Image (cartoon, rainbow, N blue to C red):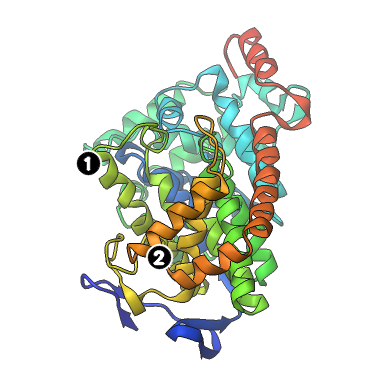
């Protein structure tokens, strides 16, 4: 247990074989990740998505919790119950912006299917999540007296309708008012949409579970994140580093695909950091950990509104304060994932500076590990050399001038920068290749799987009276 300034205690439990003290007093840790709790992993991402607004706070958790209780009352098989719970935890991952999330809470426009299809496209890339993706894909399809069992000629997973009911129930909760006084009104509102929007049998189940005051108290409890694993038993998975790379690569897409400005940033940072770690002498396992850390280093940016992230001019003080919070949120969001101790340390300290002028923990000198120093240089290098929609990336001369000035200021590690300079062309090629692959994925993400366009689905919904 180490203290890293401002009273913040980093409780990081490493699964270590040995600790190797490297050159220049830096620390490298050999570690193997094997067991990862599925809930810890998925909830860290979905909670991040809900941080962008108090109005959205705990939305994914609430939907998942209600869907679970509905499914349990229906005596769903354990695997189906797990699938609908996970679908609840991830159902709005495809919503790209703060504005889109808010619109979906206020109403269900014909383009509500946009985010459902995008989210399913991401989720189905996770190993073992095909059914979860199918539930998410159609969670805004209305029942329409049974016609909603299909959508655009494709079968709709029955649990998509259960998820839809859970979603439209919890969005009606006013967090500024006492919840029990709202319960009857909320249930009556969805009851009025029996058969038109919601499956009658699912509404019958809602009437049963909603009679329990404890359900409503749990839904509005700020500690819902801690309540869920007390009620639901989640799998602890045996995952190797390659599995974790696959999963956190999806995390990176959720983080970056919110904006065309940074749609490939995490991929560039991750692969740059991995190559630097290799050149500096990190083990194969450590290099994989560095890649994972790069993929999740900006997880906390999900708590920042797009208009701040995409601002072309200088940020004002208030906006910059929001930006400075993102690494803090990265740390706190990854902290519950016990297998991510070292990864979290590397990911969440990428804005700390050797001279103590970084953020958010004001670490300095030997308090900043070699892995963190690598991540810092990788982040700066990627940010200044990648192309953005509003400007081209820096040339070699421009980029090296920036990095050397940061070294002269005592901010970043001269050793890591020296390695980067000596392998500049190779690392640039690796960065560009990784980012080009992510750009292709981003373009596919904006389209619908199976060749369906946004306009096709929108037209179908309008033809059916706006029902879907």
Residue ID at (47%, 75%): 370
Check disc 1: other Cα within 10 Å, few if <14, some if 14-19, many if 20+: few
Whether residue 348 is visible: yes
Res 122 → quadrant? top right
Tell which of 97 and 411 is nearer to you.
411
Residue 93 to residue 17: above or below: above
Check disc 2: other Cα within 10 Å, few if <14, some if 14-19, many if 20+: many
Image label count: 2
User: Which residue in the structure is indicated by mark 1?
Assistant: 317
The image shows residue 428 at horizontal and vertical percentages of 64, 53
User: Which residue in the structure is indicated by mark 2?
Assistant: 412
Residue 466 to residue 269: above or below: above
The image shows residue 235 at horizontal and vertical percentages of 59, 67
Q: In the rendered view of the protein, which quadrant contains the C terminus? A: top right
**Relative horizontal placement of residue 176, taking residue 121 as reference (left or right):** left
Q: In the rendered view of the protein, which quadrant contains the N terminus? A: bottom left
Whether residue 139 is visible: no
Q: Earlier in the sequence, mark 2 or mark 1?
A: 1
Res 330 → quadrant? bottom left
**Viewer-nearest of discs 2 and 1:** 2
Local SS, label 2 = loop
């Amino acid at each position: 247990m180490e203290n890293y300034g401002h009273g913040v205690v980093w409780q990081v439990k490493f699964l270590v074989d040995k600790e190797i003290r490297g050159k220049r007093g830096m620390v490298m840790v050999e570690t193997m990740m094997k067991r990862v709790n599925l809930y810890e992993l998925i909830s860290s991402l979905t909670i991040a998505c809900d941080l962008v607004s108090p109005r959205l706070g705990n939305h994914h958790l609430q939907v998942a919790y209600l869907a679970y209780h509905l499914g349990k009352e229906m005596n769903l098989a354990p695997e189906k119950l797990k699938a609908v719970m996970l679908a609840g935890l991830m159902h709005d991952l495809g919503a790209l912006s703060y504005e889109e999330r808010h619109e979906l809470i206020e109403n269900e426009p014909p383009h509500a299917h946009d985010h459902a299809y995008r989210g399913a496209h991401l989720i189905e890339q996770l190993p073992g999540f095909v059914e979860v993706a199918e539930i998410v894909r159609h969670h805004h399809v209305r029942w329409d007296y049974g016609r909603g069992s299909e959508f655009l000629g494709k079968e709709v997973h029955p649990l998509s309708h259960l998820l839809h009911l859970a979603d439209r129930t919890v969005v009606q909760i006013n967090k500024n008012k006492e919840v029990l006084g709202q319960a009857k009104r909320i249930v009556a509102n969805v009851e009025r949409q029996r058969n038109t929007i919601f499956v009658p049998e699912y509404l019958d189940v809602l009437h049963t579970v909603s009679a329990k005051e404890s359900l409503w108290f749990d839904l509005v409890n700020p500690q819902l994140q801690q309540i869920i694993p007390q009620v639901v038993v989640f799998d602890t998975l045996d995952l190797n580093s390659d599995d974790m790379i696959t999963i956190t690569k999806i995390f990176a897409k959720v983080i970056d695909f919110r904006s065309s400005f940074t749609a490939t940033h995490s991929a560039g940072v991750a692969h740059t950091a991995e190559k630097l770690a290799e050149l500096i002498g990190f083990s194969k396992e450590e290099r994989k950990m560095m890649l994972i850390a790069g993929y999740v280093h900006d997880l906390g940016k999900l708590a920042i509104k797009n208009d701040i992230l995409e601002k072309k001019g200088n940020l004002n003080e208030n906006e910059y304060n929001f930006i400075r919070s993102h690494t803090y949120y990265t740390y706190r969001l990854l902290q519950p994932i016990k297998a991510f101790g070292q990864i979290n340390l590397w990911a969440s300290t990428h804005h700390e500076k050797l001279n103590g002028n970084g953020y958010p923990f004001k670490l300095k000198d030997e308090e900043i590990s070699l892995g963190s120093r690598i991540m810092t240089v990788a982040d700066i290098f990627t940010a200044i050399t990648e192309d953005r929609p509003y400007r081209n990336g820096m040339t070699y001369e421009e980029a090296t001038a920036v990095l050397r000035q940061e070294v002269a200021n005592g901010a970043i590690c001269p050793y890591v920068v020296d390695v980067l300079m000596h392998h500049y062309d190779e690392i640039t090629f690796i960065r560009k290749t990784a980012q080009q692959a992510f750009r292709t994925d981003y373009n596919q993400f904006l389209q619908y799987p199976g060749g369906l366009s946004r306009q096709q689905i929108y037209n179908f919904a309008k033809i059916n009276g706006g029902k879907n």
